[in-house]
Amino acid sequence: MSENSGDPESGDGRRKAREVLNDHLRLRQEGRLDEDLERNYREDVVMLTPSSTYVGIDGIRDCAALLYKAIEDASEYEYHATVCDERMALLEWSATGDDMAITDGVDSYLIEDGRICAQTVRYTVTFKDLSQARAVG
């Protein structure tokens, strides 16, 4: 097999897991969801969250809409750790804004043939005006 990693815009199977993850994260940071879905996800992708299972590109879009609603006022969105091997990747992330904070975001990915075929997502949204911690400060 060639060492050629393939064209990131083609979504072909020659891309390594790290390349797929980096492309996915960059496109999401740029707000290019549709391009990310087309380039980096398989049509039959499965996403697991603590509250639901999402299937296919439309499922990923629905799950992303929930996250975007939670972080719509976030002024800071950070990736803290990314770890990849040949097929698996892990992302730790956080988001903060004036009224909300997510400090425990974790996504995991199964990447095969240059596309994400399974993903898990877990995060907790804390609204600062509802938090006991804010009352103490």
Image (cartoon, rainbow, N blue to C red):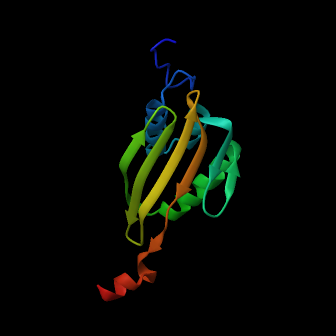
Measured from the top left, where is residue 7 in percent x and y? 50, 20
Q: Residue furthest top?
A: 2
Measured from the top left, where is residue 101 in percent x and y? 41, 68
* Side of 117 relative to 76 (left or right): right
Q: Residue at x 54, y 55 (%)?
A: 121
Query: Is residue 26 placed above or below 122 in the rendered structure?
Result: above
Q: Residue at x 44, y 48 (%)?
A: 91
Measured from the top left, where is residue 127 in percent x and y? 45, 75
Of residues 70 and 54, the one nearer the viewer is 54
Q: Residue at x 59, y 60 (%)?
A: 66
In which quadrant will I find the C terminus? Answer: bottom left
Q: Residue furthest bottom?
A: 136
* Side of 29 relative to 56 (left or right): left
* Side of 62 relative to 10 (left or right): right
Query: Is residue 17 placed above or below 82 in the rendered structure?
Result: above
Query: Is residue 18 placed above or below 121 in the rendered structure?
Result: above
Of residues 117 and 136, the one nearer the viewer is 117
Measured from the top left, where is residue 37 in percent x and y? 60, 39
